[in-house]
Amino acid sequence: MNEKLAKFVLGVVALIVAILGNGYATMTLWGWFISPTFDLSVLSFSESIGLSVFVTYCTYHPLFIKDEFKDSFGEQLLHCVFRPLAVLAIAFIYLKVFF
């Protein structure tokens, strides 16, 4: 029972970190690319979290639809945490090279 509770708590923490990380990535990418290109205002952190959650809700995610998860829990956790960091790193390199 304790192992199940620990996995549940870790999953909730990972979900919160993923939401915050994706919100930060959205806010930063918006400020780097969308705002200057289309002359729009920058997003606040709370607005970027809302936009990120909305886009995630509206897009197809096969990982959550399958009956069985293909990856282990640890791999999914790493994906949730490091995906926003990897996107920001690639966008930063692109920004420095092409702008």
Image (cartoon, rainbow, N blue to C red):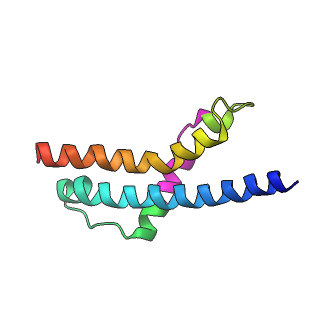
Q: Is residue 76 left or right of residue 95?
A: right
State the image quarter where residue 26 is shown: bottom left
The residue depicted at 37 percent of the width and 45 percent of the height is 86
Decide: is 83 above or below 2: above
Q: Is residue 21 magenta?
A: no
Decide: is 4 above or below 59: below
The residue depicted at 33 percent of the width and 50 percent of the height is 88
Q: Residue furthest right?
A: 1
The foreground one among 1 and 84 is 1
Residue 21, how many percent across, how many down? 46, 58
Q: Is residue 91 left or right of residue 3?
A: left
What is the magenta range? 50-62
The residue depicted at 69 percent of the width and 33 percent of the height is 69
Decide: is 69 above or below 46: above
The residue depicted at 53 percent of the width and 45 percent of the height is 78
Residue 28, how many percent across, how many down? 31, 59
Q: Is residue 74 left or right of residue 87?
A: right
Answer yes or no: is residue 51 visible: no
Q: Residue furthest front?
A: 2
State the image quarter where residue 97 is shown: top left
Magenta-drawn stretch, dominant element (helix, strand or loop): helix
The foreground one among 74 and 37 is 74
Answer yes or no: is residue 38 visible: yes
Residue 13, how many percent across, how many down? 63, 60
Decide: is 2 above or below 41: above
